[in-house]
Image (cartoon, helix red, strand yellow):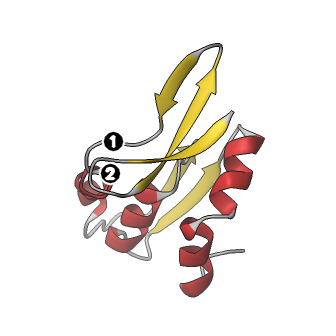
Amino acid sequence: SVSVEIANNGSSILAVEKDGYFTCMNSTYNPEMEAYKYALQYDGLQNPMVYLILGFGNGMAARQIMKHATDNLLIMFYEPSFSIFLTVLGSAFKKYLLENGLYK
């Protein structure tokens, strides 16, 4: 099952429970900072590139990558879990995509 949990800094994060194991899809301390640090590698990218995100969690890392990437980066998402996909599309990530004209 998929649930929305709260990180130590108060942010919403996705968690998945399967076969009695509970796994968070983001940092449980400061998910925004970890997503920001991950996305810095795309800052000022000059060469054209296609970036495929397999399983985008709650979209924090994807949002940060989109903020740091130039027009040379095409980002494609594939979320294999339909439950996670539906949870994320009902979240702030969908709002972000719509507000920035990125939802197609």
Choose between 23 and 47: the one closer to the eye.
Answer: 23
> What secondary structure is marked by label 2?
helix
Where the N terminus falls, by quadrant? Answer: top right
Could you say where residue 86 lies in the image, as x and y percent from the top left?
A: 74, 53
Q: Is residue 59 above or below residue 52?
A: below
Where the C terminus falls, by quadrant? Answer: bottom right
Q: Residue furthest top?
A: 19
Q: Image quarter for residue 84? A: top right
Could you say where residue 60 lies in the image, as x and y percent from the top left?
A: 43, 58
Amino acid type, label 1: Ser
Mark 1, residue position:
27
Q: Is residue 80 above or below residue 31?
A: above
Residue at image point 65% right, 13% down:
19
Q: CA distance from mark 2 to mark 1?
A: 5 Å
Residue at image point 66% right, 47% down:
78
How packed mark 2 is, by other alpha carbons closer than 10 Å (few <14, some 14-19, many 20 or more), is many
Residue at image point 30% right, 60% down:
42
Tell me: 95 left or right of 61. right
Residue at image point 25% right, 70% down:
44
> What secondary structure is marked by label 1?
loop
Whether label 2 touches label 1, CB < 8 Å: yes
Could you say where residue 50 lies in the image, as x and y percent from the top left?
A: 52, 56
Tell me: 88 left or right of 33. right
Q: Is residue 70 above or below residue 64?
A: below
Amino acid type, label 2: Pro
Could you say where residue 98 lies in the image, as x and y percent from the top left?
A: 62, 81
Q: Is residue 3 above or below residue 45?
A: above
How packed mark 1 is, by other alpha carbons closer than 10 Å (few <14, some 14-19, many 20 or more), is some
Give the label on residue 31, or none. 2
